[in-house]
Amino acid sequence: MSIVKNLLSILELEPLEVNIYRGQNRDIGTGRVFGGQVFAQALVAARRTVDAPREAHSVHGYFLRAGDLATPIVFFVDRPRDGGSFTSRRVTAIQHGEAIFHLSASFHVHEDGPEHQAMMPDVPSPESLAPELDQIRERAAHLPDGLREVLTQDRPIDFRPVLPATWSRGDDSAPMRHMWFRTIAPLPDETIVHQAVLAYASDYGLLPTALLPHDMAYHDPRMQIASLDHTLWMHRPFRADDWLLYSIDSPSLAGSRGFVRGQVFTRDGRLVASVAQEGLLRFREGKT
């Protein structure tokens, strides 16, 4: 099975009963279920209960507990409302009898109207940038033994950061980063597939942006790092197998909580999605 087909199989979900689905996990090196995975799977579960042609426009998730990579996740979907043009869904992700994640999603019938948008940043083209995976593999000898095999494995999504793949740039750097991404193979045409892949990718590299000015890396043993909530708004149609630019910044880090936000643009400059997340960035006791 190709690595992209593997991602699609993780996002497919197994129906167990009406409004109940089960999903599998993939280890990307965090030691727990990747937040973007459960976020994307919950979105897929919600969409399964919505009649076409309504598509997701607003998705909010709360991370409650770390997910166990060895155990499938069961998703329970609640149907609060099916209105004339909007549909709302709530999803609870369960492992070992406990909720690990809550999601609220809203779906909307397409409507025409006036438009405006933010401008896309001026950055180098993806073809001029090295894939992040290549950069990581070049430094493989310096990675921790327990992470080397996982971090250097093939990926379904090609991330190409504008600046080198590092999470520590020193006190004079701004908490900001830009990266292009797309799947390494074509995807099916269904809108939910592209939305789910974006949901998956939108959690990658987001929270560590808040660490850039503080001379700390994502895997710094002094830090306890965890996503608390994650929100994705989808404004316009897009394809996740075409290049998308993810522009991320962190306006605040205070009280051991970092706030980060992102904008996603197509190559021709259309703003297709916005992202916001708050996460825990706490010094471990005795590690400062």
Image (cartoon, rainbow, N blue to C red):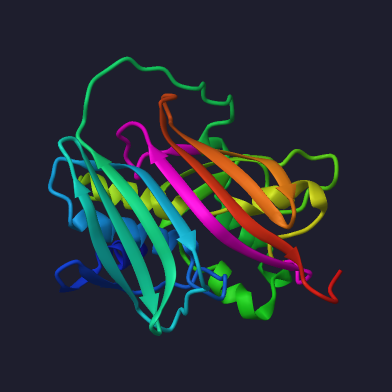
Q: Is residue 283 left or right of residue 52?
A: right
Indicate whether 34 appears above or below 216.
below
Q: Quadrant of residue 271?
A: top left
Is residue 222 placed above or below 165 in the rendered structure? below
Quarter of the picture holding the C terminus: bottom right
Q: Is residue 161 visible?
A: yes
Locate the N terminus and report the quarter of the image it occupies: bottom left
Q: Which residues are magenta?
A: 220-245
| Left/right of residue 110 with respect to residue 171 in the rendered view | left
Residue 242 coordinates in the image, percent (x, y): 36, 39
Question: In the displayed structure, would residue 196 be above or below residue 63?
Answer: above
Indicate the position of residue 88 as horizontal and vertical percent values. 26, 48
Question: Residue 277's x, y, as percent?
Answer: 55, 49
**What residue lies at 33% left-to-right and 31% top-to-bottom?**
236
Residue drawn 36% across the image and 64% down it: 3
Give the residue at the far front of this rendering.
Answer: 80
Query: Can see residue 135?
Result: no
| 240 part of magenta stretch | yes
